[in-house]
Amino acid sequence: MIVNEGAVDQLAFLKTLAEKSDGGSLRGDYSKADAQYVVAQDWAAYTPEQHALWRKLYQRQARLVPGRACDEFIVSLAALNAADGIPDFERTSEALFKATGWRLVAVPGLVPDHTFFEHLSERRFPVTVWLREPQEFDYIVEPDVFHDFFGHVPLLFNPIIADHLQQYGKGGLKALHLGGLKNLARLYWYTIEFGLMQTDQGLRAYGAGILSSGGEIEYCLTSKTPHRIAFNGERIMRTLYKIDSYQETYFVIRDFQQLFDETAPDFAPIYARIKDADDYPANSLLAGEVNIDV
Ligand code: PHE
Ligand code: FE
């Protein structure tokens, strides 16, 4: 039997999705996606109700970011001018390209790992086109345009994160060959999605999963329940995570330069070293680790 690579990729993708999305099917329309899973955003097709829901989401979240999000996020968010409705990705891309050489591409939802890494490695950030329903105001399982845009796009204007994410994409393509995907995905999860930063003004969030969440943005900074541990790449790569609850552990960087510098070395020896090592539970505090007090 001749099986083309694309079909194999597609099968693996659907299997991953079954795990990621709980039900096995995704709500995005993948029928019009090209080989890179890119679609037209079709901005004109968003309804007034959808723009109104976006404004509500935006307003709730924009009120929460002062004093909770890192300065880099707050500054870029304001410059995005995205308060009035679901943004036109083309317009944002123009501004973003001038700032850091990145562009947004519209996608139907989650894309295969290989595709995701390829986009990042070429400084394209995939943004989901669809918006959640009103009854999903506080929580959705799959990332939608609000999470992707509000959570991720502001920091693409930061030159260090811009370079870091491109390196991450290249590292992802490499990890696929080295059996390091699981480990690298954890790094993304605990930094780009749920990372905290210790600043002179106090603890701040920079992870998109936090910054697009109405509840976790406060929880991650003030709850006594989760652990907060200084960033340690190899430790993170061995740490399990929860996708259906607030995080049990947050990892804390000093600044984006630290994140960039500490993820720059070749991960191949790390993947080899931890391949057969035990994973750490999401709520573990290891010997010698300090839980940062809040
Ligand atoms: N340095 C990593 C590697 O060699 C790639 C990487 C860069 C991963 C930045 C994450 C973030 O695989
Ligand atoms: Fe995300």
Image: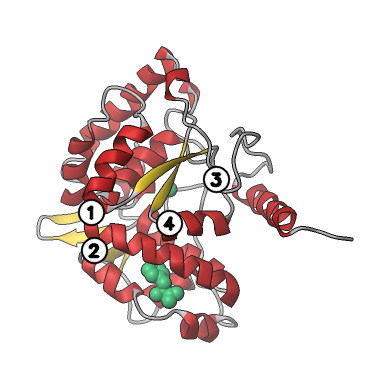
Instruction: Name which quarter of the figure residue 187 lies in.
Output: bottom left
* N-term mark: 4 or 2: 4
Determine crowd level at label 4: few under 14, some 14-19, many 20+ residues with C-alpha closer than 10 A: many
- Of the two numbered discs 4 and 1 on the same chain, state the one appearing first in sequence: 4
Query: How packed is label 1: few (under 14 Cα within 10 Å), some, or many (20 or more)?
Result: some
Q: Position of residue 97 (x, y in %)?
A: 28, 47
Residue to which mark 4 is pinned: 120
Tell me which label, 3 or 4, sits earlier in the chain. 3
Dots 1, 2 in contact, CB < 8 A: yes
Depicted 58 relative to depicted 161: above or below: above
Q: Position of residue 183 (x, y in %)?
A: 51, 70
Query: Could you say where residue 275 lies in the image, as x and y percent from the top left?
Result: 57, 81
* Residue depicted at 59% across the width and 34% down the height: 28
What is the spatial separation of the Cα atoms under label 1 and label 2, in whole angstroms? 9 Å
User: Between tags 4 and 2, which lies in front?
Assistant: 4
User: Where residue 60 sits: x, y (%)?
Assistant: 28, 29
Where does label 2 land, which residue? 256
- Give the label on residue 158, or none: 1
> Which one is earlier in the sequence, the residue at label 3 or at label 1?
3
What distance separates the C-alpha of mark 4 from that of mark 1? 15 Å
Alpha-carbon distance for marks 2 and 3? Answer: 26 Å
Q: Where is the N terminus found, in terms of image quarters? A: bottom right
Q: CA distance from mark 4 to mark 2?
A: 18 Å
Q: Which residue is mark 3?
A: 110
Q: Is residue 98 left or right of residue 85?
A: left
Q: Is residue 276 left or right of residue 148?
A: right
